[in-house]
Image: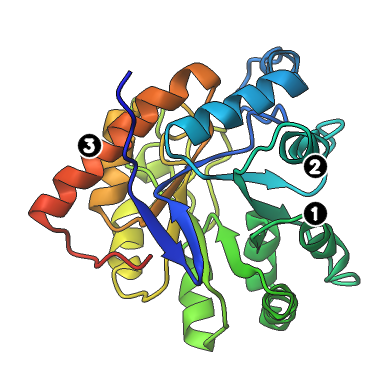
Amino acid sequence: MASVQLPVGKIGPVRISRLICGGNLVIGSAHDRDLLYVAALMRAYFTDRKIMETWQRCEECGIDTMIGPVNSPYGYGEDPTLRVYRRYRDEFGGRIQWLAQTYPKSDDLTGSIRKAIDNGAVGAFIHGNIVDNWVRLDRLDLIAKALEFIRKNGLIAGCACHYLEVPVALEKAGIGLDFYMKTFHHDHYWSATPKAERPAQGLPPHDNMWCTDPEQTAAFMATVKKPWIAFKVLAAGAIHPRDGFRYAFENGADFLNVGMFDFQVRENAILAQQIINDIRSKGRQRLWMG
């Protein structure tokens, strides 16, 4: 079986594969819309062994980084990420890097981040819902302090977000960070909310769309001189990887964060490799920022 030569980039001093293994499936957050059994099915499938097998498959295919939370968000039950990551690294010699999703609070900005620092993460970012809310409340000071703490402790630091207003506000304020994570997918799929029904602010109420303004997002991010990790690029399974990967990379994303089953890893890595090489041969509007 031929090896996959997946391209890599850099965020700060950290080398990261252009395709990153997402963590929502591992914690049972599968964006299952109205299918009530799916989250339980995900948790049953992703045993500790299966999580480690998935990460091992990633490493074999050139995916050198995974994203996972430091604790279980929003009542999804026990989060296995920290426990399994320790086992994978200490017992099995796993080398996959951890980019930690953290949950700072206004009255405790560092506790969640400290877990990432103490457990070997190479980077940390503030969860998108928190960043979205703090920007809406004009609490950029909280974001800046949390990012400063991450960077002071030697990790690359970033912000996730669902709304374009977030990078616009952070760039305008000159907030120091190493990367953005912004939702990004096209809207040419059958369950996408029609444009006339999309809210002026925020996301549609139904769990089927995470980027309501892809053209505006691409245009603004073309002006940003920081690495961009795009996520929800497949609209949580509504878009095929060969379509979603190409759209995100062609329109400026430097890295893609994608949730994957173990049996999807190799195909996704090959697709990402082929698409990136093709785009590089033709060029794209936004320079690669990582």
Residue that label 3 marks: 274
In the rendered image, residue 35, in percent from the top left (x then y), is placed at 64, 15
Above or below residue 185? Residue 117 is: below
* Among the two numbered marks 1 and 2 on one chain, the one whose residue lies closer to the N terminus: 2
Q: How far separated are the C-alphas under marks 1 and 2?
A: 8 Å
For label 2, the SS is helix
**Toward the viewer: 136 or 246?**
246
Residue at 70% x, 15% y: name it.
Answer: 36
In the rendered image, residue 3, in percent from the top left (x then y), is placed at 33, 29
In the rendered image, residue 254, in percent from the top left (x then y), is placed at 36, 57
* Among the two numbered marks 3 and 1 on one chain, the one whose residue lies closer to the N terminus: 1
- Give the numbered dot on residue 82: 2
**Toward the viewer: 15 or 78?**
15
- Rate crowding at label 2 as few (under 14), some (14 to 19) or many (20 or more) other CA atoms within 10 Å: some
Give the amino acid type for the residue marked by disc 3 in the picture: Gln
Visible in this render: residue 110? yes
Quarter of image, res 268: top left
* Among the two numbered marks 2 and 3 on one chain, the one whose residue lies closer to the N terminus: 2
Residue at 56% x, 76% y: name it.
Answer: 177
Residue at the outermost left position: 282
Residue at 79% x, 34% y: name it.
Answer: 87
Give the amino acid type for the residue marked by disc 1 in the picture: Asn
For label 3, the SS is helix
Q: Quadrant of the C terminus?
A: bottom left
- Rate crowding at label 1 as few (under 14), some (14 to 19) or many (20 or more) other CA atoms within 10 Å: some
For label 1, the SS is loop
Residue that label 1 marks: 119
**Toward the viewer: 122 or 168?**
122
Q: How far separated are the C-alphas under marks 3 and 1?
A: 34 Å
Give the amino acid type for the residue marked by disc 2 in the picture: Leu
Q: Are marks 1 and 2 in contact (CB under 8 Å)?
A: yes
